[in-house]
Amino acid sequence: MKAYFDCETSALPLEILQKSMPIFEANKTLKDPEKIAADIEKKRQAYIADAALDPLTGKVLAIGIYDELGFSCISGDEKTMLETFWKLADETLSTSNQLVGFNVNDFDLPFLFKRSWHHGIQPPKILRDGRYWNRDIIDLREVWQLGDRQAVGGLDAVSRFFGLEGKSGSGKDFAATWESDRAAALKYLETDLLLTKKLAEVML
């Protein structure tokens, strides 16, 4: 049995980000005060936009799961989400089943681990084998790379390579969509997981 998963993140609240936000400087070639202010604000907004990708400045917003029961989403309080997901991961790996995702070894799992440490949660030891991930955690991006860590290809591009439909949107928009249209956000997450499942059926 395979359980497919995908972690979606968002930036921490602005009042928290402001405490660690660097002091931005405008391009030195700019002289006009309005252009200087606009350049600084552009860099500030870029920092906030990228904050969701770093566990120091971001948090877990939702964790999508697709298994034999179909699609489900873990959401709500971050600490509770993490505890729920780790229980599922522990049960899956303890029964010799596989956890499958795309780019999960480089992004999702490290992010989940570090946010867990923030909350004083210790992830299940079964996830790690020394400095490596459990062999039953399958990262389809690593399968695609075939040992070449420089090989490019995200979920959308690799899916289209195999003749599958690509992604239905961008992960960069997930947090905003989650707030404005929860049904659309859940549909995006489910579509990504179904795409991951189809990729696994082709590649594995």
Image (cartoon, helix red, strand yellow):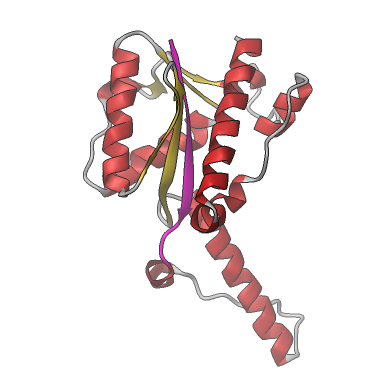
Which residue appears at 70% of the width and 33% of the height? 156
Q: Is residue 6 magenta?
A: yes
Q: Nearer the viewer, residue 168 or 104?
A: 168
Quarter of the image for the N terminus: give it.
top left
Give the left or right position of residue 185, taking residue 17 as reference: right
Asked if the stretch drawn in magenta spans residue 166, the answer is no
Q: Is residue 49 left or right of residue 69?
A: right
Query: In this rendering, does residue 147 appear at all?
Result: no
Nearest the camera: 76 or 8? 76
Q: Could you tell me which quadrant the C terminus lies in?
A: top right
Return the x and y of residue 23 as percentages of the image width and height: 51, 75
In percent of width and height, residue 68 lies at 43, 16
Determine the residue positioned at 32% across, 48% down: 78
Number of marks drawn: 0
Look at the image and give the residue range highlighted in magenta.
1-13
- On screen, residue 184 versus residue 156, left or right, reads left
Task: State whether residue 146 is above or below residue 65.
Answer: above
Compared to residue 107, the image places residue 67 above or below, namely: above
> Is residue 32 among the parts visible in the rendering?
yes
Q: Nearer the viewer, residue 125 or 189?
A: 189
Main secondary structure along the magenta-highlighted residues: strand
Asked which quadrant contains residue 197, the reply is: top right
Q: Estimate the x, y position of residue 66 in percent, counting from the top left.
A: 47, 24
The residue that appears at 65% across and 72% down in the rendered structure is: 42
29 horizontally vs 7: left or right: right
x and y percentages locating residue 198 in the rendered image: 62, 18
Q: Residue furthest bottom?
A: 33
Looking at the image, residue 139 lies above or below residue 54: above
